Amino acid sequence: MSELAILGGPKTRTEPYPQWPVWDQRDIDAVTEVIKSGRWGGYPYPGPKTAELAEKFAELQGGGYAVPMINGTVTMEVALRAAGVGWGDEVIVPAYTFQATASAPMAAGAIPVIVDVDPNTYCLDANAAARAITPKTKAIIPVHLGSNMADMDAIMVLARSAKYNLIVIEDCAHAHGAKWNGQGAGTIGHFGSFSLQSSKTLTSGEGGILLCKTPELAAKAASIIDCGRPHALGGGPEDPNGLSLMGANYRLSELQAALALAGIERFPAQAKQREQMAAYMDESLSEIPGVRLMKRDPRHTTRSFYRYIFAIDPQQFGMEHDVLCAALDAEGIDSWTGYEAMHNYELFQPQKSTLAVPSAFPEYFKFEEMNLPEATRACEHEAVWLDEAVFRAGPKGVDDAVEAIRKVQKNALELNKAADELRERYR
């Protein structure tokens, strides 16, 4: 019998990793309180739970004016609209991210300009962003990916240049609690976009929070998500003339806010454990030939994440990353090859639609002409994503994952032969 579980051998880990989302009586009590109150939805905005969530989330991140809303895609669209970015403006986005980072600008009428990533972090390459700037560029959306943050020093220098004067919207869907030079993710740029989707480390099932740099921007964002009603969130002035901005109903419900508030109580301890175990994982993986750790910038002072990413050199490690991930899954270690590069992403194909932006500006969506070597290499050969649950299982959870990686590498010849046979069979 093979040693490998995928070929009939025993699993490395038979015990399931901890479930997510985590819940306890606090969540039941919080939702029950809202149900009994009779105020379930988001109108009038903000409800008492939503207002409390805004205050506590800004405290968690260390600043800004928080505007909760329905998801972490709308947050980016609303940020662009609140900043006056719209039809025909260019917004720079990284090639390695969830499709929402590029679709949000289109929802605001702007054009996503896709640039390559830094191979050391898989985050937006500030030099690539600088090369992509044109007179039409109005904003940059850096993504804090996996357990890394984008180089916010370089990005803010670029954005604050009198020559460019760009809006910065940090996509922090992976970075609740993370800090750069001691400053919370999402508080460095003009906006920070956070997701509360069910897999995220702070979740209300669905939802999002937009951190705004100023009370004026927060008031505009609140108006946009509340059908255009005037707001004075964060102490900003309310529009005395009635409707402030064209808007729609993107409000967060009181039920979702209650769940997020319960999650905030647990979050610091969970984040601390993940960070400690990620350091332990770094040390363990550094001893495996063919494994490359993502570079930890010393300015990234607090690491927080919901997916841990490392890279392999397929030739040195002995196999491609998709083969490794399939084998790890069979060993009881949830893993994934990650997102596709944006120009090959099956969830992001606007040139095949009749949407307004790609129809009006088709020259920006000639994906076959895009050259994004670093993102492509990560997506097609290198990147391995591990679930955050591995790191909430303590040292044993990390040890099992590392043992499984070593086991798969040890049996690379047998595994590759089997993979080739399967590919031939299903060709």
Image (spheres, grey):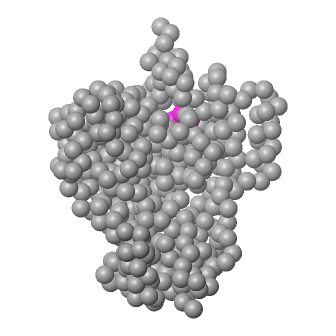
What residue do we see at 80% from left, 51% from top? Answer: 25
Residue 166: image quadrant is: top left
* Residue at 48%, 83% in the rendered image: 408
**Quarter of image, res 299:** bottom left
384 to the left or right of 267: left
Secondary structure predominantly adopted by residues drawn in magenta: strand
- Which of the two residues, 380 or 238, is positioned nearer the viewer here? 380
275 in magenta: no
Residue 326 sits above or below residue 267 on the image: below
Give the residue drawn at x 64%, y 27%: 42
Magenta stretch in the rendered image: 64-68
In the figure, 124 relative to 220: above or below? below
Drawn side of residue 412 relative to residue 13, left or right: left
Task: Locate residue 301, reporting x and y percent.
Answer: 45, 62
Question: How many labels were placed on the picture?
Answer: 0
Residue at image coords 55%, 34%:
69
Residue 243 at x, y = what percent?
49, 12
Residue 402 appearing in the image: no
Residue farthest toward the top in the current orientation of the protein: 241
Residue 198 drawn at (x, y percent) = 60, 49
Near-viewer residue (198 or 259): 198
Which image quadrant: the C terminus?
bottom left
Residue 189 percent across, percent down from the top left = 38, 43
Nearest to the observer: residue 352 or residue 12: 352
Q: Decide if residue 416 is in sight here.
A: yes
Q: Quadrant of the N terminus?
A: bottom right
Is the residue 395 above or below the residue 22 in the image?
below
Among the 4 quarters of the image, the one containing residue 55: top right
